[in-house]
Image (cartoon, helix red, strand yellow):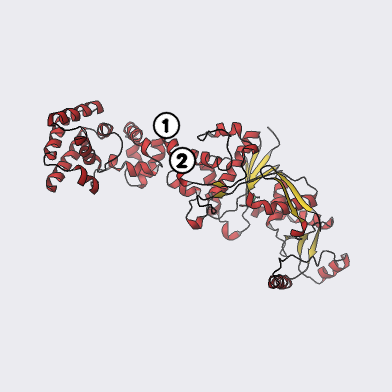
Amino acid sequence: MSDIRVRIAPSPSGYFHVGTARTAIFNYLYARAKGGKFVLRIEDTDVARSSKEMVDVILDGLKWLNVEWDEGPYHQSRRQDLYPPYAEKLLLSKRAYRCFCTPEELTAKREEAQKNKQTYQYDRKCRDLTDEEVDANLNQGKKFTVRLKLPLEGEAEFHDEVLGEMKKAYEDLDDFIIVRSDGSPIYNFAVVVDDILMKITHVIRGNDHVANTFKQNEIYDALDVDRPVYAHLPLLLRPDRSKVSKRKGDKSVTEYREEGILAEALFNYLALLGWSPKDDRELMSEDEIVKVFDFKGINPTNAIFDPVKLNWMNSQYVMKADNHTLVQIITPYLIEADLATKYWIETRWQWMLKVVEALKERCTTLKDFAENGYYFFKDDFEYDPKGVKKRFKGDDLPDQLDSVREELKKHYELRKETAEKVVRDKAEEFGVKPAALIHPIRLSLTGVTGGPGLFDIIEILGQPEVDKRLSRAIEFIRNLN
Ligand code: GLU
């Protein structure tokens, strides 16, 4: 065990962004790698975007990814009385001050700056009010915000484990507000107070928070509390280098889950977005990653989230998944596609194991099992029209297929070796290549031209089903001519 404590602090929005999941994974991995604790805090002060459902989207997604938190979830919305004492402390130590400027005054000044093409900064009008002036304003019942008193010159600096030495001139930072006139804390202030109270030692988050970090550091300093260690992660970009975003149709964690990406595959993929083990390994389990996970492996340049690569990784996980597990996890997709019921699957478990074994090498997602393997469950498929043109031709075909059907029928238990022998012998008898029979038989049995080995399909479908489907196809072909 160590004293290391990390956290994620998602703001719910009803959408579990892959970037949030990646940040969660990096924090979780760091905590596991260093024997620390991983805290979950929900930053839900924006009431409109923080319904229970919106929070649950994140909690469910994290649980599904197996990113288990050690503490929390803490809800920022339920901690509102923890912040004022810290503001009070800053006022007392004169590291912060009350600002009585009205919103109208400030807007006018902002507009004036805009008109003159200047960047607006608060002019620090209330920074040096005397205690008497402050008291007079308070006695008049004037509303005030609380602003932090920043140095007027020099540079704000911090060390980042990923980005190195970071600097910003104080000129470019103004005395920002930490408490609104209604007494509620501003985001950056609440984050710091929470991180202090939760004893967070390492803040690992997206590099879009660097500007916040400069401000948050000033709050730590003003409160006389040690700053945490920072590691700002590269952003996730789309292959066209724009930001991953819902508006552009990029999928959320929930959507990837629904379409049949495995949790382990998404975890593995996201862990490699911005971090690498510095060798060629790509397929890595959580335990393997934990053994070598460190800030040194984090690359500061922005990472590309490539759905094609994720699909590839998922197909690798599908391929090596245990068949029992696969049957279990594809069950909802089969039910959803109306191909089977739970009971039906449970009573045909051994048979289902063969189906997934036959299909798994050709499935990218779990949904593909239902889409590519439709014919294992239903026989009401149409024959693929292109396949019909290409494979259901030749005057001799219906009789040849019928002869194969008759021969297959002699074998009650239709093993794939037997089926193969029957088809090959028949091809020889008819003086055609085996393929001239294999392709039309496949189309007859499945309605499609590709898929697992034909003889595997025959064995899985079983004698009566093969017979029925061949008969239907023979009739169909006869009617074509
Ligand atoms: N609530 C912030 C967000 O969702 C994260 C804050 C933090 O990590 O400091 O982006």
Q: Where is residue 99 in the image (x, y as percent from the top left)?
A: 78, 65
* Total numbered circles: 2
Q: Is residue 236 left or right of residue 110?
A: left
Q: Residue 396, relative to residue 417: is it above or below?
A: below
Q: Image point 34% across, 43% down: which residue?
A: 370
Q: Residue 314, relative to residue 174: is it above or below?
A: above
| Residue labelled with disc 1 | 322
Q: Does the rendering let one see residue 204?
A: yes
Q: Image point 37% across, 35% down: which residue?
A: 361
Q: In this view, does 96 lie to the left or right of 432?
A: right
Q: In which quarter of the image is residue 179?
A: bottom right
Q: In which quarter of the image is residue 411?
A: top left
Marker disc for residue 401: none
Q: Which amino acid does label 2 sit on?
A: Leu
| Residue labelled with disc 2 | 262
Q: Which amino acid does label 1 sit on?
A: Asp
Q: Where is residue 125 in the image (x, y as percent from the top left)?
A: 80, 67
Does mark 1 have its CB less than 8 Å from ligand 1? Answer: no
Q: What element carries label 1?
A: loop
Q: Residue 349, relative to residue 247: is it above or below?
A: above
Q: What element carries label 2?
A: loop
**Label 1 Cα neighbours within 10 Å, binned few <14 / some 14-19 / many ≥20:** few
**Label 2 Cα neighbours within 10 Å, binned few <14 / some 14-19 / many ≥20:** many
Mark 2 or mark 1: name the one nearer the start of the chain: 2
What is the spatial separation of the Cα atoms under label 2 and label 1, in whole angstroms? 13 Å
Q: Where is residue 8 in the image (x, y as percent from the top left)?
A: 62, 46
Does mark 2 have its CB less than 8 Å from ligand 1? Answer: no
Residue sitting nearer the eye, 53 or 168? 168
